[in-house]
Amino acid sequence: MAAVTLGGQGRYAAAAARLWPVISAADPVLAALAAATLAAHRRQLGGHAIARDLDALGLRRLTEAGLTTGKRSPAWAGDDHRPPGTGAAAARSDVLLGLAADAIGLGRPDEARTLLGIESASADGGWRAEIKRGWVAAEVELVSGRPAAALAPAQAASAAAARSPSLRLRAKSNLVLGATLAAAGDHRGALPAIKDCLRAAITHGLEPLRWPCRIVLAGLEPERAAQHRREAVIALDCVLRHADPAGRAAAVASPWVPTSGFELGPNR
């Protein structure tokens, strides 16, 4: 939970230091959850290939423990003592949805669709899975050049997030919905969703959400594009300087992260 919170703030180096011991621990469910969390942090820095290895590691740990059948078998009995959303079903959804998101970033939308189908047919992964499933389904359609088809899953994710206790997931769902509306040509509808996300990111210190919001706003508000891009650079620079060396190197190498003005130096 500490690593999840730190990651939401963009403090990726501190998060990674807490996650690696859990990834190598004996408990396969916690190991998978930790691997999926670190994979998400790598993806947020554009490191989809690194994230794929981590998600695959999480899936392997669950498979070796007999926890990937998608049915509640005796091997799932250990879930009874876990807090909601931290059991085998949630871990399975996390790694499968993570692998689908990794495939999108690596330009493999068909693979992402297949993984989405596998995850959707599994045991109930909980409310986080419901939200993230909508994000990934929307992103698959967006990278496939079908923004109109991305609207329904983006709206479903936003509705599910509104019912959830997670402020960050609500904010990111607004970002996904706003970007989808913008891609579909509905700039008027996109603007309040993106601004809601940016407001939450500034108010609550959700630094990794600030720079994508600014990038989208640069397209929605051309008269303020230069200002939005400057703010995006500042926010991204802050995130990168709180990332570990592997995360920063992934961001610099990624075509998805605008790091042209960032000098790879010591993290804070």
Image (spheres, rainbow, N blue to C red):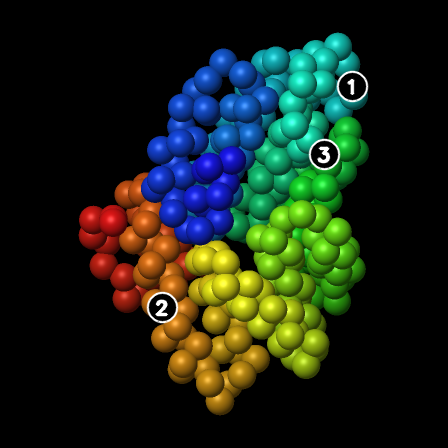
Provide the secondary structure element on which disc 1 rests: loop
Provide the secondary structure element on which disc 2 rests: helix
* Circle 1 residue: 72
* Nearest the eye: 246 or 195: 195
The reply, left or right, for residue 266 in relation to residue 28 is left
Task: State the residue at coordinates (58%, 72%).
Answer: 195
Q: Earlier in the sequence, mark 3 or mark 1?
A: 1
Q: Residues within 10 Å of mark 2 (few under 14, many from 20)?
A: many
Q: Is residue 235 above or below residue 67?
A: below
Q: Amino acid at mark 3?
A: Gly
Distance from disc 2 to disc 1, alpha carbons, whole Å, reads: 47 Å
Q: Amino acid at mark 1?
A: Arg
Distance from disc 2 to disc 3, alpha carbons, whole Å, reads: 36 Å
Quadrant hosting residue 245: top left
Q: Is residue 116 above or below residue 18?
A: below
Distance from disc 3 to disc 1, alpha carbons, whole Å, reads: 12 Å
Quadrant hosting residue 98: top right
- In the rendered structure, find residue 233 and report the number of the disc placed on it: 2
- In the rendered structure, find residue 236 and report the number of the disc placed on it: none
The reply, left or right, for residue 247 in relation to residue 65 is left
Looking at this view, name the residue that lies furthest to the top. Answer: 74
Residue 242 percent across, percent down from the top left: 32, 50
Counting the numbered discs, the total is 3
Q: Residues within 10 Å of mark 3 (few under 14, many from 20)?
A: many
* Circle 3 residue: 125
